[in-house]
């Protein structure tokens, strides 16, 4: 498999977020990963302390220029995640547009990180940039419920709402949308959260079709950081292997997440000791230890097809 | 295995040198790798063009401070390679010394990158820093012949000279020395090059011995970049698994190198086409494709014990 990904995300010296979370799993699955580190921090910002440096939009451009001057600016995928700076994000948009001109088949996997649980945790002025410039270029989008709502201006109170929001997102650009988490009630009870996905594709006979799926994911009583980055990276990998089968792609992706998180929470609890809540350092994803699960995830979660219609 | 490495090396967006060359193989072998990127460049400097930014000694210190403030500055290994800046290197030394106080069993694996084939390719003022400050805190060093000669002030024209130079290096600090390449005449012919290693052991009864090995490694007709970084990382891994058996550690390390290089040169020639010399982008190590060889290298080179 010759597949090259350009991933533009954070680097942390210690732990697994951003490029640290995305790179190893993709490499283990045989992808060539070129990585531009948008920041270099000691660790993620959920620890007691964090220190480091950020890359400016100008410096990002300089790095891209280097790649371009050597005529190696050919990528099959681009992957982006958490960003705090509008000019940086706008430079990313310019780079993606140019890379799509170089390779029209390029797939841009975008996690539109803006907030969660009803509140934004990036500067507000990123929303118009995502909505008007980034999402229109994206091919695969992994918003959570809050991000999907603010991008479309519609609230989600039911599965029908979620379906409409995903269709609105399709109209904005991406053919594949996964609502990574919602607070919709799961048919399996309150120990589960609901994930939904929607994929538009063109059948061999030329007609359009949409597949919508739904998964119930076991909730875990802990705050993980970097799981969204791992999710987007693994969705890239599994949609690559199952390009017209969102059900399988999501089952594999969600299953990898399950194995990594299960291993992580178990180890974190061991480190913390009985009756103690693990801290941020102890909750770092057990990435390296999960290599076998990443390579070949046992499918432990099944997706339901909730709507399949021809358009 | 719970083993944490702090690797302070370059990062390139594309390709495999520095941390890009060291991290994936170590992670694949189950090591936790914390990485401080000393630079971020588009690609290595052997391409026609390269662009990027460097980390200052102050910025390095700031990153280390972050780790320390969270009380997670506990490492089993530190790994360093190519550096061009004396103040950066001196900051690295301070960090290593502090980490050794935090964990006295810490092993510092140092590739003292200074030059090759008779000339220096870093600023000259790095030489005294390596000689007087870095090598004395190193536990494992991987100089080539030129660097070994420069650090000890002694030329190598025979295996006996090489053994003396390695003993001089031991006296400076490291218990494990591998001269990664030399121009000593190989017994297997001129398609090979000679590498040597030396490891001092202290036995439970207090007695000391030195294990010395010699390897002959097939030469490849191409210029690879990042192979030295991969070598140091893999020597870290295999001496970890074989702490008192330099022969086996070297056989595994040199064998991994062989598999990766062979796969790389084969692919590079396919890309370049018949009769053409591959370019630097085409010669990037086939790292990801070599995962199985990294995990479990088939031994293809045998080391000889020498005295």
Image (cartoon, coloured by chain):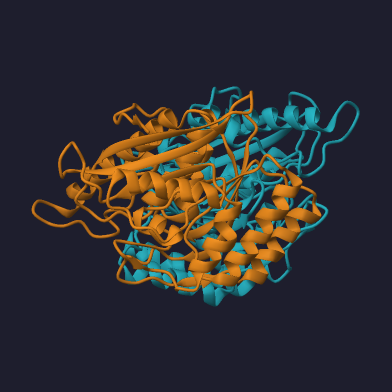
Which residue occupies 75% across, 49% down?
A: B101
A253 relative position to B193: left or right: right
Please state, as top left, top right, bottom left or bottom right, where the C terminus of chain B lies in the image: top left
Q: Is residue B306 above or below residue A236?
A: above
In this view, the residue in front, A180 or B297, is B297
Asked whether the viewer can see residue A199, the reply is no
Question: From this viewpoint, which residue is outermost toward the right?
Answer: A275
A25 relative position to B154: left or right: right
Q: Which chain is the one coloured orange? A: B
Q: Residue B291, located in which quarter of the rendered image? A: top left
In this view, the residue in front, B135 or A50, is B135
What hue does chain A carry in this figure?
cyan
B21 relative position to B274: left or right: right
Question: From this viewpoint, which residue is outermost toward the bottom?
Answer: A58
The image position of residue A241, as x and y in percent, is 41, 36
B90 relative position to A4: left or right: right
Which residue occupies 60% across, 22% down?
A: A300
């Amino acid at each position: 498999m010759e597949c090259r990904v350009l991933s533009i995300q954070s680097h942390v010296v210690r732990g697994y977020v951003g490029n640290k979370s995305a790179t190893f799993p993709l490499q283990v699955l045989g992808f060539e990963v070129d990585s531009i580190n948008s920041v270099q921090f000691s660790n993620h910002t959920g620890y007691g302390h964090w220190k480091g440096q950020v890359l400016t939009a100008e410096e990002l451009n300089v790095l891209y220029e280097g790649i371009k001057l050597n005529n190696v600016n050919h990528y099959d995928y681009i992957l982006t995640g958490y960003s705090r700076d509008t000019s940086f994000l706008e430079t990313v948009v310019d780079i993606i547009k140019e890379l799509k001109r170089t390779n029209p088949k390029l797939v841009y996997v975008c996690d539109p990180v803006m907030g969660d649980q009803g509140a934004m945790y990036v500067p507000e002025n990123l929303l118009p940039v995502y909505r008007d410039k980034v999402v229109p270029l994206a091919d695969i989008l992994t918003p959570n419920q809050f991000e999907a709502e603010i991008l479309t201006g519609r609230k989600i109170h039911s599965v029908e709402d979620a379906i409409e929001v995903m269709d609105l997102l399709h109209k904005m650009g991406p053919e594949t949308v996964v609502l990574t988490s919602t607070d919709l009630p799961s048919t399996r009870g309150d120990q589960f959260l609901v994930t939904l996905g929607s994929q538009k594709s063109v059948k061999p006979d030329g007609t359009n079709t949409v597949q919508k799926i739904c998964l119930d994911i076991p909730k875990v009583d802990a705050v993980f950081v970097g799981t969204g980055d791992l999710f987007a990276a693994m969705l890239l990998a599994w949609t690559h292997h199952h390009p017209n089968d969102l059900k399988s792609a999501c089952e594999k992706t969600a299953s990898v997440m399950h194995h990594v998180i299960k291993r992580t929470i178990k180890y974190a609890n061991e480190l913390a000791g009985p009756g103690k809540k693990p801290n941020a350092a102890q909750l770092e994803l057990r990435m390296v230890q999960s290599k076998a699960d990443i390579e070949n995830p046992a499918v432990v979660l099944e997706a339901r097809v909730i709507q399949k219609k021809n358009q | 295995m719970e083993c944490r490495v702090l690797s302070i090396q370059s990062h390139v967006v594309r390709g495999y040198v520095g941390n890009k060359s060291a991290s994936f193989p170590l992670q694949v072998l189950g090591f936790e790798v914390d990485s401080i990127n000393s630079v971020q460049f588009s690609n290595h400097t052997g391409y026609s063009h390269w662009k990027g930014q460097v980390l200052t000694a102050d910025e390095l210190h700031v990153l280390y401070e972050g780790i320390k403030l969270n009380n997670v500055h506990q490492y089993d290994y530190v790994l360093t390679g190519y550096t061009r800046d004396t103040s950066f290197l001196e900051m690295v030394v301070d960090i290593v010394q502090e980490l050794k106080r935090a964990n006295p069993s810490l092993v510092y694996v140092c590739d003292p990158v200074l030059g090759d084939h008779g000339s220096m390719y870093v600023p000259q003022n790095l030489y005294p820093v390596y000689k007087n400050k870095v090598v004395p805190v190193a536990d494992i060093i991987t100089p080539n012949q030129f660097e070994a000669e420069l650090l000890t002030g002694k030329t190598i024209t025979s295996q006996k000279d090489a053994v003396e130079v390695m003993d001089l290096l031991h006296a400076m600090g490291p218990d494990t020395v591998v001269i990664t390449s030399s121009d000593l005449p190989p017994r297997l012919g001129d398609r090979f090059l000679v590498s040597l290693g030396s490891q001092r052991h202290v036995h439970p009864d207090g007695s000391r011995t030195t294990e010395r090995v010699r390897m002959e490694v097939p030469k490849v007709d191409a210029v690879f970049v990042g192979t030295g970084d991969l070598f140091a990382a893999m020597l870290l891994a295999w001496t970890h698994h074989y702490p008192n058996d330099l022969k086996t550690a070297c056989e595994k390390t040199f064998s991994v190198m062989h598999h990766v290089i062979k796969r790389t040169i084969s692919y590079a020639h396919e890309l370049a086409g018949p009769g053409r010399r591959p370019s630097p982008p085409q010669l990037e190590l086939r790292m990801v494709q070599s995962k199985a060889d990294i995990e479990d290298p088939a031994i293809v080179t045998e080391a000889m014990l020498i005295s």
